[in-house]
Image (spheres, grey):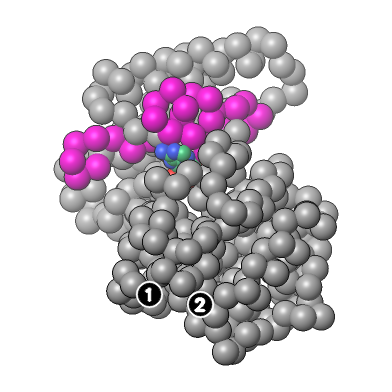
């Protein structure tokens, strides 16, 4: 058991009010881990006030409904903040977390910034939800769970691991996923929510496959302008899913989606197998995991530079490694 787990449980016990935060532009892991932990704490400590305090919302996960309304500032002063799935404080969705009396960090990203009175960071975990499952499992004599909490947690375990496909999935991941399934997760409904797409989205996928480019060494990339997002009637979240349409092209070990933001800046999503791409992201105001990272560029010129850097990296990788696909 990680040494911080017990400390976090003790800290939770000290407080009557607990506010739970996550990163902005939430994914299944951010939403699942915060909702899952909140549910476990509500069940276990019915006398405590537990609130999700986030300033944005995910359309993709809207089947889970809205999160809690933001509390007035003065409500933060006597609360413990739990900041989840977020490597750096500036990525927290609701910056008012700073008003909390104390806060702790629970995360599985590469630790680039220390923050919080207790930090429980395990970068080898496949998801923050896996950590919440481990937390429940470690203290299951004390903590309560139900099918709803397990479903939130299982959602993040499934989505952040690419459906249990990425290399950080361990035997422990699967054992903990089993612990969650045993609580009665309705996987038919969950997977329907995760996989169902509007017809427009299939047309967009066809567009991505038609327009994507492959660099000399095999970097696949697509640029999705604001005009295209409008044409296909896409939210920026839907447009961002373009990256996953390029994930299994033989020889393309790096694939990149460039999504134009409303303000003209360009969100970059970097993905890879075998090759590390987080270092490229770090050169362009970003970061993330070795094989899944994000960044921002401010012009087409900068976009081309990033692609050239990725191409060079892939070239080196292919020259110096064998057995890649
Ligand atoms: P995304 O492509 O936005 O899903 O991001 C992939 C991974 O990289 C996630 O784990 C993000 O938390 C991380 N990430 C994305 N953008 C940034 C950024 N600007 N700075 C640091 N990490 C990021």
Position of residue 126 in the picture relative to residue 90 (left or right): right
The answer to whether residue 269 is magenta is yes
Q: Is residue 7 above or below residue 143?
A: above
Instruction: Tell me which corner region of the image, top left, top right, bottom left or bottom right, holds residue 159.
Output: bottom right
Residue pictured at 66% horizontal, 84% vertical: 44
Q: Secondary structure at mark 2?
A: strand
Query: Which circle marks residue 75 in the picture?
Result: 1
Magenta-colored span: 261-288
Q: Is residue 312 above or below residue 220?
A: above
Q: Secondary structure at mark 1?
A: helix
Position of residue 298 relative to residue 166, above or below, is above
| Res. 45 visible in picture | yes
| Residue at 66% across, 29% down | 274
Q: Which residue is mark 2?
A: 17
Identified at 63% across, 78% down, the residue is: 40
Which quadrant of the figure has residue 319? top right
Residue contact at pointers 1 and 2, CB within 8 angstroms: yes
Front residue of 25 and 13: 13
**Can you give x and y, in whole percent of width and height, for residue 19 in the image?**
48, 70
């Amino acid at each position: 058991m990680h040494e911080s787990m017990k400390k976090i449980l003790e800290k939770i016990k000290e407080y009557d009010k607990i506010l739970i935060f996550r990163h902005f532009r939430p994914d299944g892991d951010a939403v699942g881990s915060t909702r899952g932990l909140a549910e476990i704490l509500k069940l276990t400590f019915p006398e405590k006030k537990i609130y999700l305090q986030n300033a944005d919302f995910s359309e993709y996960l809207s089947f889970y409904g809205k999160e809690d309304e933001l509390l007035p500032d003065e409500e933060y002063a006597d609360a413990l903040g739990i900041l989840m799935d977020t490597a750096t404080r500036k990525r927290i969705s609701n910056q008012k977390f700073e008003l909390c009396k104390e806060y702790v960090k629970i995360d599985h990203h590469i630790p680039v910034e220390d923050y919080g009175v207790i930090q429980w960071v395990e970068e080898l975990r496949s998801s923050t939800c896996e950590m919440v499952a481990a937390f429940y499992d470690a203290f299951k004599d004390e903590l309560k769970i139900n099918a709803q909490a397990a479903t939130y947690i299982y959602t993040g375990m499934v989505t952040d691991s690419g459906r249990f496909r990425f290399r950080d999935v361990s035997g422990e991941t699967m054992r903990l996923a089993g612990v969650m399934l045993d609580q009665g997760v309705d996987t038919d409904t969950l997977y329907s929510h995760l996989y169902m797409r509007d017809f427009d989205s299939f047309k967009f996928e066809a567009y991505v496959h038609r327009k994507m480019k492959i660099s000399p060494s095999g970097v696949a990339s697509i640029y999705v302008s604001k005009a295209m997002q409008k044409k296909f009637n896409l939210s920026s979240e839907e447009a961002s899913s373009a990256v996953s349409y390029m994930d299994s092209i033989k020889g393309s070990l790096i694939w990149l989606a460039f999504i134009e933001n409303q303000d003209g800046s360009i969100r970059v999503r970097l993905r890879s197998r075998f090759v590390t791409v987080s270092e490229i992201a770090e050169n362009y105001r970003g970061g993330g995991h070795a094989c899944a990272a994000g960044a921002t560029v401010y012009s087409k010129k900068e976009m081309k530079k990033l692609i050239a850097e990725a191409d060079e990296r892939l070239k080196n990788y292919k020259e110096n490694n064998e057995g890649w696909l």
